[in-house]
Image (cartoon, rainbow, N blue to C red):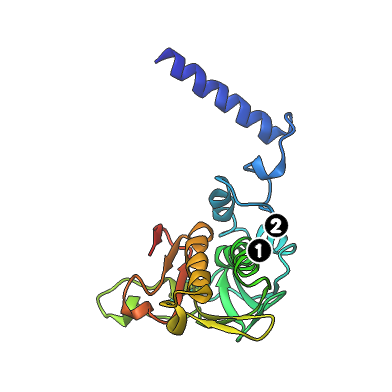
Amino acid sequence: MRVLLVFLLLCAMAAFAVWRGWVDVPERWNPWAPLDVRAEPNFLTAYKLSRLQNDPALCDQVLSSSGLRFSRQADSDPSARCPLQNTLRIQGGDVALSSSFLASCPLAVAYALFDIHTLQPAAQAVFGQRVARIDHLGSFACRNIYNRANARLSQHATANALDMAGFRLADGQRIGVLKDWGDEGNKGRFLRLLRDGACKNFSTVLGPDYNAAHRDHFHVDMGRWSVCK
């Protein structure tokens, strides 16, 4: 017990020294440094993402290096059935979008991480080229899960979820979740790399293997639960 207490005390002292800046630690290993979306995600990434939910200024700072084009949206009335707080409209960037979409700050940053660390590496590995556009089915929808009257609000109700349906390569080739998930060649391999990689960027990832409702898209969100199916 005494050894454990000494260990915890030393950990606390080390954390305090880092927080005060007395010890020089690389930013990616410093829990109080802003998240750098270009750096490889690590065990601190989820914590740094959680800090963005109620800090619009920090959110904008993090996204400024992401390559995304975005505009900040006015907060809605907190008493609304589906209130939107610290929300952005994502308009594209290095990767074009089928249309702009609303996103909570954590979702926007996770999307940037997905683009940099999962989407483009997978496209280069399988096809030798980059993804130029994402086709999606939307993000914000003020509704319960599966539109059931007795269900809880969906993550879509707070713009904390996005449904991605297809990916267009630089040469114009399209890979669609509905059409190509069962493909045994490169398209199917690519989609499985995306699903598996997305699970490291988002809290929840649901695709065709989950149920029929997700047969044509990947649902990704930044909710409380961690699910990868």
Q: Quadrant of the N terminus?
A: top left
The spot of residue 137 in percent (x, y) is 49, 84
Q: Is residue 114 left or right of residue 37?
A: left
- The label on residue 169 is none
Mark 2 is on which residue type?
Arg
Q: Which residue is mark 2?
A: 38
Q: Which of the 4 image quadrants contains residue 29?
A: top right
Q: Residue 56: in sight, yes or no? A: yes
Q: Residue 79: in sight, yes or no? A: no
Q: Which residue is mark 1?
A: 116
Secondary structure category for the residue under label 1: helix
**How many labels were placed on the picture?**
2
Mark 1 is on which residue type?
Ile
Name which residue lies at 65% across and 61% down: 59
For residue 7, above or below residue 203? above
The spot of residue 156 in percent (x, y) is 45, 75
Q: Is residue 178 left or right of residue 9?
A: left
The spot of residue 22 in percent (x, y) is 74, 29
Name which residue lies at 68% across and 76% down: 95
